[in-house]
Amino acid sequence: MAASRGRQTARHVPAGLERGLRNYWYPVLASADLTDGPVACRYLGEDLVAWRDSQGTAHLFPDYCPHRAARLSIGTVLGDTLQCIFHGIRFAGDGRCALMPWEPDGSPMLRKIRAVSYPVVERRGLIFAYLGDAARFPPPPPEAELPADLWDEAAVGYVLSETWEANWLLALDGADRYHLPILHARSAVQRRDGPAPDPAASESGADRRLAVARGERRLAVAATDAAGRAVVTGMEADAAFADQGFHLPALLALAVQAQAGTRPYRIFLWLFPIDEQRTQVTRYISRYAPTAAEREEWETFFHAVVRPRTLQVSAEDARVAVSQRSLAFARGHEQLLPPDGEIYQRRLLLRDAFLTQQEGRRLAPRLGASLSSQVS
């Protein structure tokens, strides 16, 4: 695709991309966070309201009443409808106006207004919504564009969600492999031949040296400590994991071994915008556990090891993203170096996905494919 057209917000960022890529599936809420009443949320710079009907089915609307624009999130769920607090107009889950207090049932006036209803699917403790223009870009089946672990009954997963005070593109820029032995020297590294190095000695990743080799699918990074002993981060721990890497619109898939000798697990990490200044960070952390004993062992290991490790790594990544100030500042003051090639490719993919939609087409996620094969 040709170089980006029109105004740019920052380097490699056509105006509007800083607010995200529409017309994709996103994990907008944890299932546990949506109970009886409507819940306000904000993604891709849009105010939204989520609610459940009497059958427990989740729905997602833009957070305004199409009558007079009052927030629907301060309304009431009544049976299978969401009622606006202002004049009592009710909307069904598909957005259809179900009641106007001053009109008889079946009145043609009910067809005059309609709420926008985004397609929603709920899987494994996460509520996914297709945020976009369903008429122009019909939503693909979620199982075609979301991780297979969400549908595999033998895979058991846990949800972790948080917010970073940084633009989503800065958050994604932080996902390279070169920083792992340095930034995460205390939280993630371990010696290949034994326990992790002394935390005090490796707090800042001092004296780490990196060696780069071309692997089967991508560059491989090896690190040593000051004594020349190999250290590993536990990342890319499963060579058979075909989805390793980045996928549109904002998904990073990682295979991780938290401790030497333990079974790898998978982190599916979505980093997508709440607005221009904040990023929603949602992880689905999964491992195959087909038996009751394996599920019990995985639950214990997740809460004792995986959860604290993941949150510490996340806090370190968030600190760096916030430190880069704004997207314009970071892109305006950077100088890309050879290790940044994969980040550069990712930026081009995101740019092309955004510009392609302006031309009436849509780039699909390609789980199971290498990053380079996704770039047009």
Image: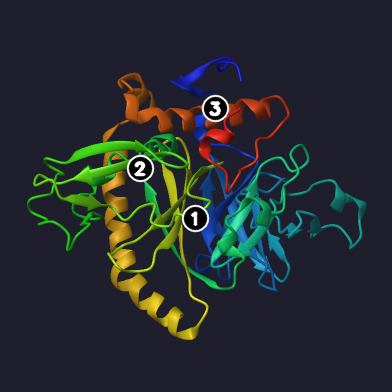
Residue type, numbered disc 1: Phe
Q: Which mark is residue 116?
A: none
- What secondary structure is found at the residue carrying circle 1? loop
**Residue at the spot of label 2:** 165
Q: In which quarter of the image is the N terminus?
A: top right
Instruction: Identify residue type, mark 3.
Output: Arg
Return the x and y of residue 181 as percentages of the image width and height. Answer: 23, 46
Please report the residue visible at 52 percent of the width from the left and 38 percent of the height from the top. 371
Circle nearer the viewer, 3 or 2: 3
Mark 3: few/some/many CA within 10 Å (<14, 14-19, 20+): many
The residue tagged 3 is 351
Real-space CA distance between mark 3 and mark 2, rounded to the nearest whole angstrom: 22 Å
Left or right for 180, reference 6: left
Q: Indicate whether 262 appears above or below 268.
A: below
Residue 89 location, quadrant? bottom right
Q: Position of residue 156 (x, y in %)?
A: 50, 71
- The residue singled out by tag 1 in the image is 241
Residue 165: quadrant of the picture: top left
In the image, residue 122 sits, relative to residue 282, either above or below, namely below
Q: How far apart are marks 3 and 1 (CA)?
A: 27 Å
Residue at 72% x, 53% y is 141
Tag 2, which secondary structure? loop
Q: What residue type is labelled 2?
A: Glu
For residue 75, say whether it is visible.
no
Image coords of residue 249 (percent x, y): 56, 41
* SS at mark 3 in the image: helix
Residue drawn at the location 25% of the way across and 55% of the way down: 188
